[in-house]
Image (tube, rainbow, N blue to C red):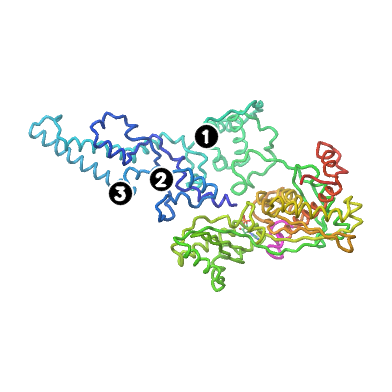
Amino acid sequence: METKIMKKKQAGPQQTCGFVSYKTCLISPSHLSRHLTSSSLLSLPLERLFPPMDLRRRPPKPPVNNNTDGSFRSYQTRTSDDDHRRRTTTIAPPPKASDALPLPLYLTNAVFFTLFFSVAYYLLHRWRDKIRYNTPLHVVTITELGAIIALIASFIYLLGFFGIDFVQSFISRASGDAWDLADTIDEDDHRLVTCSPPTPIVSVAKLPNPEPIVTESLPEKDEEIVKSVIDGVIPSYSLESRLGDCKRAASIRREALQRVTGRSMEGLPLDGFDYESILGQCCEMPVGYIQIPVGIAGPLLLDGYEYSVPMATTEGCLVASTNRGCKAMYISGGATSTVLKDGMTRAPVVRFASARRASELKFFLENPENFDTLTVVFNRSSRFARLQSVKCTIAGKNAYVRFCCSTGDAMGMNMVSKGVQNVLEYLTDDFPDMDVIGISGNFCSDKKPAAVNWIEGRGKSVVCEAVIKGEIVNKVLKTSVAALVELNMLKNLAGSAVAGSLGGFNAHASNIVSAVFIATGQDPAQNVESSQCITMMEAINDGKDIHISVTMPSIEVGTVGGGTQLASQSACLNLLGVKGASKESPGMNSRRLATIVAGAVLAGELSLMSAIAAGQLVRSHMKYNRSSRDISGATTTSTT
Ligand code: ADP
């Protein structure tokens, strides 16, 4: 989601490669001054006089604001942090036409226009006088020589600025940049531009040993399109919109890909997938789909309901192990869960001229008197978005504002972002000097390990607990209460502390979270924070039984939107009884899904910890994770 939001923002001034006119010449101030005084001007090659520069016809998007220190801050704005760092440290801003003089573009153009026409007028005048008084034309005064040089210089400038692009618009019809997605989307561009990648600046090594390609015999019409894609006449990304048939587009793209790379895609299925269902929302430029087996763990007895938990994984033992944990929980009476909090967050970063002004924004946003107004503005984004809190952190002149809202049954990243956008627009009245650097300032924090999620929570914060009877620990889990409690303390608590873990006080929560996320159409990248979990174990009833709990503050799940709509994922949600929007109360399905994730994690923790306590882990792996076909006895675990 985050990438989606940043996509348009990143199409800023730095994206010039798609429009570069490499042969375009432009006069730099130093060249101009040096050569206008030089008598050898006309003898110098053009390339030396006017070195090639990047020149975009389309003016770059304007900088957000002028920086007081006069640096090129606009190149550091509205980008992800990584890009930000890269640009601020290594990338100089691309040269512009206005670099010819230290003036804004329109003034530079005006100077050269005026120069060209006034000098042309002067020379014509002189020419007429010479004819009238029979003066030889080749006898020129210093002033006339200067005028000729000025005429040539201004002519070259104007030709470089307006003329070359006109010519190149014909030449470069087949040399655009198919990767310039933001621009192509903006323009709804159906021109013929190439889909070939730009020429790399380093030489690309060839991969060894391509396997023979099994080429499908395509209909003649498709064969022609494949050739056009390979030749760069039709951009690969435009196949869906051109053909109006997503499956055919995928098949043509795949064939072109095989021929261009010389590598076979055999084994990656093409048939049997609804390519229309992913168009414009789940995946671009498809060439097939990956098959991941889905296993079932359960029944998971949670809050009085039985769930069969779908887990998409290729890791042997994982489903079997979780299944064993479910069994132990089931016999002991099941687990109970509580949703502590339900709110998705987004935190833009805004900058002011002073830390004082940034602090004023913080006081304004955190003032309870302003909350109702902010809520009205924020909630306009969706009938499901409901603002819960605003928290502002200051770093010098910069403010990071963490908005938190409920999002119904959607995971909610789009929804919260729209609400934040509304508030930022509203704030410009009271804070016109506020410079919005980026809608995401990483205080959110999405898809990165962060203490803020661990402490404050993000998405659904869930705690899930169960009491497992001592005899079940012995019979089913093949270990003892005391061994489990000790191992939990030394591994999940002390061990993770020794490792400096952030929210990783568990055995393998991410194993279960990832598998359930993939099966149910969640964003697997959010596994980073969704897997934050602390597993607690305590001997109770005089040491006979064990109380186990998992506390997971940031489970980010939804049952509408994104990948949840796709047929396979939707079937898995249906199996859990949480498909789509809740009819009873918005948010109920997604909250229930979060509790199921926590319940399955509890089962997984119980089983893996038991396996380690009993010393079964390696044995089990050697037996069942190394191509054994009989998994009937695989009850231990996967990795840790
Ligand atoms: P996300 O915000 O997780 O990226 P999307 O924006 O893709 O999700 O999907 C949410 C969409 O589903 C919104 O357009 C919203 O209006 C719609 N919707 C329908 N029913 C619900 C519901 N019960 N809860 C949340 N959103 C819902």
Question: Observer-nearest residue: 298 or 216?
Answer: 298
Question: Observer-nearest residue: 160 or 91?
Answer: 91
Q: Amino acid at mark 2?
A: Arg
Which disc is residue 58 wearing? 2
Which disc is residue 107 wearing? 3
Q: Are marks 1 and 3 in contact (CB under 8 Å)?
A: no
Q: In this image, 141 relative to 491: left or right?
A: left
Q: Position of residue 638 (x, y in %)?
A: 79, 45
Residue appearing at x 49%, y 33% in the figure: 201
Which disc is residue 196 wearing? 1
Decide whether residue 412 is among the magenta residues.
no
Q: Which residues are magenta?
A: 578-591
Decide: few, some or many residues near mark 2? Use Cα within 10 Å; few <14, some 14-19, many ≥20: few
Residue appearing at x 88%, y 60% in the figure: 545
Regarding residue 101, the answer to whether it shows in the image is yes
Regarding residue 308, the answer to whether it shows in the image is no
Which residue ends up furthest to the front in the rendered image? 498
